[in-house]
Each structure stands twice: as structure tokens, then as C-alpha cells.
Image: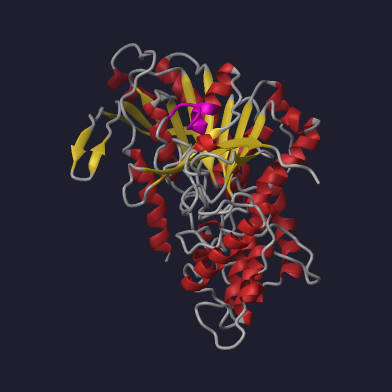
């Protein structure tokens, strides 16, 4: 199981690394020989930093293969460095510095899961390189951990802190210093992109290091780390504590179909859509599917109903009061990281369960975990180390003109979408209202999209992601990264962006398009025109009742 999912993550990153094309912007070429300048970085002296390798990667032309067109990429200097500021801290940083066509921009990228690898940043770096940016990523300071396995971090609280807060700032300051050494001048602008753990890393930058970036684009950001992992454990326990509780693929499809139909009847979707437009407003109880007599794939047993209800509710206390967020109707997908993933073990452990090993030791057994008793213990130890995204203020970032865009799929089953909505509502109150917050930060919710991509809804609207295909255009109307740059550089705030769904059988064919609107607005059908066309929808704020 672990091998399968780790391969899926890394393969997606590697595949997109082949995506850069040689699109050159205004030239800011390093003086002197590129090979010599790249090699010289190995001798660069920076505080607490060791440059481990420098390699000049030659440009590669685009080529046509039996698999289709494979874009090329420009020549760049690849630098790997390690920052060791304290005992127990070892933060890896990788940079790609284009030898021609540098635009004067520094571009930071986040990691994913427990980190431990550079590979999860490669998709964003490939896009940065394509645009002529000096681009960087970090392993989050957690090697030899891997994205799905954090057991290597047991007994290493400084690595927890680097993962929870410090590694992205270290990547940024180190990356900018190496960029200046290579080009002989400071970067004039800086942008950050990341999703999941990388989303959390970007929020921490905006909240605590407001001078690091001019624009930050993050997706599905993890905020409350301890309760986020507890939510996954809650799901796993619901499906596995008692026999007969696990939801099979046919049962998940049954749930998904019923949820979509129910929400459509309540006015929260369109006929023919395979997703729910506004699942946060929909009320769906899986008990309506409970078997009356013999159990079949066309109904749910009493135990399966209990599991589904636990997934929707999220963690609750003994009295049933919510402790955290649950998954939304329409998210019941048997996908790589869907509800099936949440029910199955990785090395005989719940997914992402290693965080609990940090507190309770390598012999921790999920079957003995009591949420009411044990979560206060977990929070007492880890909250101040890994949950900084739940605190802080965007005021300083906004005051210096910083721009933040957050996106989140409504069908996400790894990071609850309600958490992003709550984040914006909280900061709107801090900043003096939603209109004031919208001057510097905007949230785009994506109906039908799963964690950072995939799902039944349109998921192609961000050239840095790597999981869905590239948008049909990288203009600000179709690509949130371009929209972020237009907002940060030219003051063109994004009022909507068109999300695209490509055909799974014919990857180049557009199946449908739908606008994503800044929260709390949503896409509303105009009543005329094809529902597969974005032009048939307008962005509209919900009517308050």
C-alpha cells in the first residue's frame, strides 16, 4: 500500500517535471560562463549552510514520441544545499537557476505529507523554470521521512518544528541568497506555490514571515495538524474497529450517487453534473440507504451507515459535539486518496498515523486511542509546534501589499474544505470584514475536486500543481498562478477563473468548463446556454436568510 501511494505521488511530480517549455522572458543572463558560475556556487559561504552539489543541466528540446509531445526545458544550474542552524535541524534546499532568460523572480515551492523529499516540489519548479524564474523547494527538514511515513521523526522535536513552521523560511532566505550570488543582484519579486502540506507552509509564510513573498498561492492547506491527523484516524477507526463496517467500492459509489441526487433536489447542483456545486449547504443522511431486509450492494448495512455518518461528521466528543470538520457530501470516491484510502492501513497503521507515534512512541496502537482522553495529550505536546497556521494575522502581509490566493476542492478527503472557509471567516473578522480581506486574500472553492486535483469536477486551473493536466491557457483567466502574478504586480484582482475538466479517454479534449468564484460567491447557471460552458454561469453571492 505504501509503495503504491508513494509511487503515485512521486510519479506525478516526475511526469510534470518534463513539462517546462522554452518560453523566454526578458533576458537577465549571468555575466561570464554559466558553467563556471554554477560550479562557483559550491564555494559559497552562507551562515549554517553547506552547498552539497552544483550541476549545470543542459537545455533539452521538445520532442515528439509515441506517447505524444514532450516539451523541452531551458538550461539551468541545479543546486542542493543543507541548512543546519541547530542540533537536530537539517533542512534540505534545492534550486533551479535558469542560465538564460531569468526574469528577476524568485519562486518558492512547498512539500507534501511528512516531506522528506524534494520531488513533491518539482511540478511547481518546472513551471517556475518555464517562466524564467529562479525556483526552489525544500524537503521540509524531515529526511529520512517520506510523504506517507513519519516514523523516522519519533523523538526529534526540532524536526517537527522545522516541518510545522521553520523549513520554508529557511528555504526562502537561503534560496534568495544563492540566487543573488548566481545573478549578481537580488530578485525583484518573489512568489510561492504549494498544496496540502505545501499549502500550510505558504500560510505560515504569510502569517509569520510577511516580507518573504509578494504573492502566495496555496491549495488545500493543512492548518490544524493534530486534529487533521485525528480526523483521518477517526475515519479509519470507524471503518475498522468492528467487523462489517468498511465501505466497499460499490457502496461508496452508491453513497456518492445518492448524495449528488439529494443535493441536486435541494438546489445545490445541476442536473447532469457528477458533482455537487455547494455541498456545504446540502443536508444528506446516509440512513436513507439502509437495508430493510437482505444486505446487497444497493443498500447499506447498519454498520456501514454508522461509518458513513462518522466520515461526514468528523471527530466528535462522547456527547456527539463536533471537535473538528468532516468530509462533505459528494466526496465519497474510491480514488487514490478518496474514502477507500482512508479505510486501509499503511504498514498496519492508519494513514498518517505516525504523528501519534511522536507522542506515544513506536508501540502506539490505534485500537487503544480514546479521542476524548488522548487528543488533549497530543495537543499539549504538539499544538505549539505544528499548528501555527491556526493562529497569527495576515495584517502585516496585507499592509506591505502581499497577495494571497487559496483554493480548495469541495470533494477533498485529506484536508477538510470547511477548514479553509473557517480560516477566511476568521481572518475577515480580524481584518475588519470580508471586503477588506478581499483586498489582499481570496479563496476559491472548487466543486467536485479532490485533494489538490482529480475528482469529478473541473480541476485544471493551476499550472504549478502537476496532478491535473495543465489548463488550456496560462493566462490569468484560466490559471491561478498567472492570476496571482497579475494581482501582485499589476493590481488586477481575480474576480473569477475558469476551471477545466479534460476527458479521461481523450486527454486533449475539454469535457467541460466552469468558473470558480471568490468565496463567498459561487457559480450560478444563467438559465440559458450549455451547462458545459463557463460562459453560461455568473459569480453570485448567496442570499442571506
Residue 95 falls in image quadrant: top left
Q: Furthest-front residue in view? A: 528
Residue 470 falls in image quadrant: top left
By secondary structure, the bulk of the magenta-drawn segment is best described as loop
Q: Furthest-top residue in view? A: 31
Residue sitting at 38 percent across and 17 percent down?
Answer: 25
Q: Residue 355: x, y in percent? A: 60, 59
Residue sitting at 30 percent across and 19 percent down?
Answer: 34
Q: Residue 502: x, y in percent? A: 39, 45
Residue sitting at 58 percent across and 22 percent down?
Answer: 488
- Give the colour scheme of this rendering: secondary structure
Q: Residue 270: x, y in percent? A: 57, 51
- Nearest to the observer: residue 349 or residue 144: 349
Residue 508 falls in image quadrant: top left
- Nearest to the observer: residue 236 or residue 518: 518
Residue sitting at 74 percent across and 34 percent down?
Answer: 393
Q: Is residue 545 left or right of residue 149?
A: right
Span shown in magenta: 474-483
Does 124 sit above or below residue 296?
Answer: above
* Screen quadrant of the N terminus: bottom left
Q: Is residue 226 left or right of residue 352?
A: right
Q: Residue 84: x, y in percent? A: 53, 39
- Nearest to the observer: residue 117 or residue 491: 491
- Nearest to the observer: residue 289 or residue 238: 289
Q: Is residue 234 left or right of residue 298?
A: right
Whether residue 365 is visible to the viewer of this picture, yes or no, is: no
Q: Is residue 88 left or right of residue 230?
A: left
Residue 437 is covered by the magenta coloring = no
Amino acid at each position: 500500500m505504501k509503495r503504491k501511494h508513494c509511487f503515485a505521488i512521486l510519479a506525478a511530480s516526475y511526469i510534470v517535471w518534463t513539462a517546462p517549455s522554452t518560453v523566454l522572458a526578458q533576458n537577465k543572463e549571468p555575466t561570464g560562463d554559466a558553467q563556471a558560475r554554477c560550479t562557483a556556487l559550491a564555494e559559497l559561504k552562507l551562515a549554517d549552510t553547506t552547498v552539497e552539489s552544483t550541476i549545470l543541466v543542459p537545455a533539452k528540446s521538445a520532442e515528439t514520441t509515441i506517447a505524444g509531445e514532450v516539451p523541452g526545458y531551458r538550461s539551468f544550474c541545479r543546486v542542493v544545499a543543507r541548512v543546519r542552524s541547530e542540533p537536530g535541524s537539517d533542512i534540505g534546499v534545492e534550486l533551479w537557476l535558469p542560465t538564460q532568460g531569468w526574469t528577476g523572480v524568485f519562486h518558492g515551492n512547498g512539500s507534501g505529507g511528512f516531506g522528506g523529499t524534494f520531488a513533491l516540489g518539482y511540478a511547481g519548479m518546472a513551471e517556475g523554470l518555464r517562466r524564467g524564474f529562479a525556483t526552489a523547494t525544500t524537503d521540509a527538514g524531515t529526511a529520512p521521512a517520506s510523504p506517507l511515513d513519519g516514523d523516522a521523526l519519533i523523538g526529534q522535536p526540532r524536526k517537527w518544528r522545522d516541518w510545522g513552521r521553520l523549513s520554508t523560511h529557511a528555504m526562502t532566505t537561503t534560496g534568495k541568497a544563492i540566487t543573488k550570488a548566481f545573478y549578481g543582484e537580488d530578485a525583484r519579486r518573489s512568489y510561492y506555490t504549494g498544496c496540502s502540506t505545501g499549502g500550510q507552509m505558504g500560510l505560515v509564510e504569510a502569517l509569520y514571515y510577511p516580507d518573504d513573498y509578494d504573492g502566495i498561492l496555496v491549495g488545500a492547506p493543512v492548518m490544524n495538524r493534530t486534529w487533521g491527523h485525528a480526523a483521518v484516524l477517526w475515519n479509519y477507526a470507524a471503518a475498522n474497529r468492528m467487523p462489517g463496517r468498511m465501505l466497499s467500492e460499490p457502496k461508496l459509489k452508491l453513497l456518492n450517487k445518492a448524495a449528488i441526487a439529494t443535493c441536486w433536489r435541494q438546489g445545490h447542483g445541476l442536473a447532469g453534473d457528477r458533482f455537487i456545486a455547494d455541498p456545504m449547504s446540502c443536508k444528506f443522511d446516509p440512513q436513507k440507504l439502509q437495508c430493510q431486509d437482505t444486505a446487497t450492494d444497493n443498500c447499506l448495512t447498519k454498520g456501514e451507515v454508522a461509518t458513513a455518518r462518522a466520515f461526514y461528521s468528523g471527530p466528535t466528543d462522547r456527547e456527539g459535539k463536533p471537535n473538528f470538520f468532516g468530509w462533505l457530501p459528494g466526496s465519497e470516491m474510491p480514488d487514490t486518496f478518496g474514502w477507500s484510502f482512508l479505510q486501509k492501513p499503511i504498514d498496519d497503521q492508519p494513514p498518517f498515523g505516525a504523528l501519534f507515534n511522536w507522542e506515544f512512541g513506536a508501540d502506539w496502537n490505534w485500537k487503544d486511542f480514546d479521542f476524548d482522553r488522548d487528543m488533549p495529550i497530543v495537543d499539549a505536546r504538539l499544538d505549539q509546534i505544528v499548528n501555527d497556521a491556526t493562529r497569527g494575522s495576515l495584517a502585516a502581509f496585507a499592509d506591505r501589499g502581499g497577495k494571497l490566493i487559496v483554493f480548495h476542492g469541495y470533494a477533498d478527503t485529506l484536508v477538510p474544505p470547511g477548514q479553509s472557509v473557517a480560516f477566511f471567516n476568521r481572518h475577515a473578522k480580524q481584518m475588519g470584514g470580508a471586503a477588506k480581506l478581499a483586498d489582499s486574500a481570496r479563496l476559491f472553492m472548487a466543486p467536485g475536486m479532490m485533494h489538490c486535483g482529480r475528482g469529478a469536477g473541473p480541476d485544471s486551473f493551476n499550472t504549478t500543481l502537476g496532478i491535473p493536466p495543465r489548463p488550456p491557457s496560462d493566462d490569468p483567466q484560466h490559471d491561478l498562478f498567472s492570476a496571482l502574478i497579475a494581482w501582485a504586480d499589476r493590481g488586477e484582482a481575480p474576480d473569477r477563473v475558469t476551471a477545466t475538466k479534460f476527458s479521461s479517454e481523450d486527454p486533449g479534449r475539454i469535457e467541460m468548463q466552469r468558473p470558480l468564484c471568490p468565496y463567498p460567491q459561487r457559480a450560478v447557471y444563467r438559465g440559458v446556454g450549455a451547462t458545459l460552458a463557463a460562459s453560461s454561469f455568473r459569480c453570485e453571492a448567496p442570499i442571506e436568510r
